[in-house]
Amino acid sequence: MEIETLAIFADVARKESFAAVARERGIAGSSVSRAVAALEDELGVRLLQRSTRRVSVTEAGVAFLDVVEPLLLEVERAWAVAQDAGKSPRGVLRVTAPLTFAQLNLVPLMPEFAERYPYLRFELLLTDSMVDIVAERVDVALRLGHLDDSELISTRLCDMVYSACASPAYLERHGRPEHPAELAEHSCLRYAVPSFGARWLFRPKGGGPPQEVPISGRFTISNGVALRDCASAGLGVTLLPRWNVATHLADGRLVDLFPDYEATATRFGGAAWLLYPSRAHVPLKVRAFRDFISEKFAEGAPSEAGLRG
């Protein structure tokens, strides 16, 4: 009974899919199926129930998985301890991050990080979906917003500062609003994310109560870069993090409408976070990535550097 076979079984049991495990591991689906079948033959019990539509874990499989998973975690930890003894990060670093945030703030940093640690290999899982970093064996997650009762170890990278902005062409055609409440009369570009409702929140930077402003418009868009570019093209007013619109504000393609106000579409006080699982031993590759990213975010999101300058 090999460790790799146990790991393949655990992956299939968690994902309930032979094909998904094969894609993730870069091997043939038949190899995954044979590995699980060989394990079942060796044990003399059926661990997984197959059908044409799905894979489910049998009662014996659940009991076996409950014992195997902690053992696999211990093997993974032992592997990390042994690799760390070489004093240079090695192995595969799996990082998940929101797509637009990663494109603007993580991907540009990777050449320097890769050069600094030549023995590391990388898997970047860029998605706006919430990845279960334990189940997916992710080493580090970058997340945006608020952390609610997270059991993960967290490092706050930077505040989420939002700007309501529009292009000069849009303002020339429709006039510039003098107060956030006037946005109710403008065409606004909405972000197609469940937590972003049909109202934006504003409060004076000098202190004062927050104000809800109802917004509406013809465009609802699911990608931050597309939302920014539509605003730059004059299609309406948008509310986006400054790390997304920083270059466009700096070169005049967009105008910050209310620089004296804080704004958000959800709750005030959001941030960008770096998270990793709580473990007795934090792998050297995770510590190296954490320290590197914290260094690069010391003055805020890297993509905002132009505005700070």
Image (cartoon, rainbow, N blue to C red):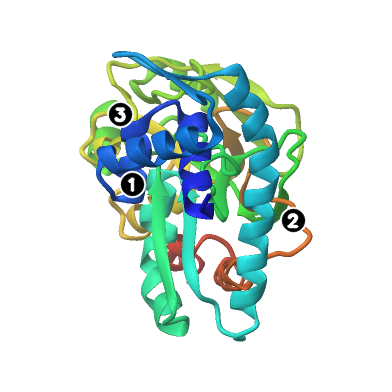
Marks 2 and 1 sit apart, C-alpha to C-alpha, by 44 Å
> In the rendered structure, which amino acid carries the disc numbered 1?
Leu
At 44% across and 80% down in the image, what residue appears?
A: 119
Image location of residue 35, percent across then percent down: 39, 42
At 51% across and 42% down in the image, what residue appears?
A: 136
- 10 Å crowding of disc 1: few (<14), some (14-19), many (20+): many
Q: How many marks?
A: 3
Image location of residue 57, percent across then percent down: 53, 21
> In the rendered structure, which amino acid carries the disc numbered 2?
Arg
Q: Earlier in the sequence, mark 3 or mark 2?
A: 3
Image location of residue 89, percent across then percent down: 55, 77
Marks 3 and 2 sit apart, C-alpha to C-alpha, by 47 Å
Give the number of the disc on residue 254.
1
Q: Is residue 298 left or right of residue 238?
A: right
Give the number of the disc on residue 71.
none
Give the number of the disc on residue 279.
2
Q: Quadrant of residue 61?
A: top right
Asked if residue 81 is positioned above or below residue 241 in the image, the reply reads: below
SS at circle 2: loop
- The residue that label 3 is drawn on is 236
Asked if residue 146 is positioned above or below residue 284 in the image, the reply reads: above
> In the rendered structure, which amino acid carries the disc numbered 3?
Gly
Q: Is residue 151 left or right of residue 308?
A: right
Image location of residue 22, percent across then percent down: 32, 41
Using the image as rendered, state which of residue 43 and residue 268 is in the foreground. 43
